[in-house]
Amino acid sequence: SKRIGAGLYKLRFFGTVYEVRVLEQFASEMSKLMPVKQEVDMSSLILAPMPGVLKSVAVKPGDMVAEGQEVCILEAMKMQNSMTSARVAKVKKVNFQQGQTVDEGDVIVEFE
């Protein structure tokens, strides 16, 4: 077994992994009242993985991009990081231009 946290465990039984939540009675009752966090489709965004300066932006709104196509280059700590598209998509919005500074988590490009 492996403890993940928040009462969540992964148990392996004859090669099959089961996720099990173990909570005290009060915590179990309260967890039923908690809203479920919605998963965000990250394939429609290019996020800055770290603070840096955009060295180039190769797309503009309306452009079609292929999976794995370079969208922009981010320079951080004297290293250039190529940011690529996770899927085939149409560029919806470009939030930063060449030479601008971005912080970790900033949305650089949005896809439809």
Image (spheres, helix red, strand yellow):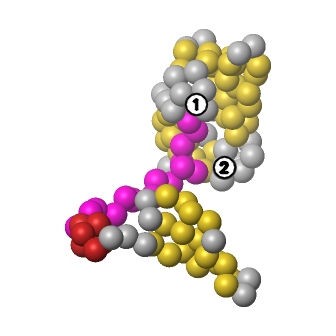
- Say which quarter of the image contains residue 27: bottom left
Pick out the residue farthest to the bottom.
14
Q: Is residue 38 magenta?
A: yes
Labels 2 and 1 touching (C-beta < 8 A): no
Quick check: 48 above or below 64? above
Q: Quadrant of the N terminus?
A: bottom right
Q: As drawn, is 26 to the left or to the right of 55?
A: left
Seen from the viewer's position, the closer of residues 38 and 99 is 38
Q: Tell me the element at label 1.
A: loop
Range shown magenta: 33-47
**Residue in the picture at 51% in, 40% down:** 110
Camera sees residue 61: no
Look at label 1 and name its amino acid.
Answer: Ala
Q: Nearer the viewer, mark 2 or mark 1?
A: 1
Q: CA distance from mark 2 to mark 1?
A: 14 Å
Q: Earlier in the sequence, mark 2 or mark 1?
A: 1
Label of residue 70 in the image: none
Indicate the position of residue 57 as horizontal and vertical percent values. Answer: 64, 25
Q: Main secondary structure of the magenta part?
A: loop
Camera sees residue 46: yes
Indicate the position of residue 81 as horizontal and vertical percent values. Answer: 73, 27
Q: Is residue 76 magenta?
A: no
Residue position marked by numbered label 1 in the rendering: 48
**Residue in the picture at 76% in, 22% down:** 80
- Say which quarter of the image contains residue 45: top right
Quick check: 91 above or below 8? above
Residue position marked by numbered label 2 in the rendering: 86
Indicate the position of residue 44 as horizontal and vertical percent values. Answer: 54, 48
**Residue in the picture at 28% in, 74% down:** 25
Crowding at dot 1, Cα within 10 Å, few <14 / some 14-19 / many 20+, comes out as many
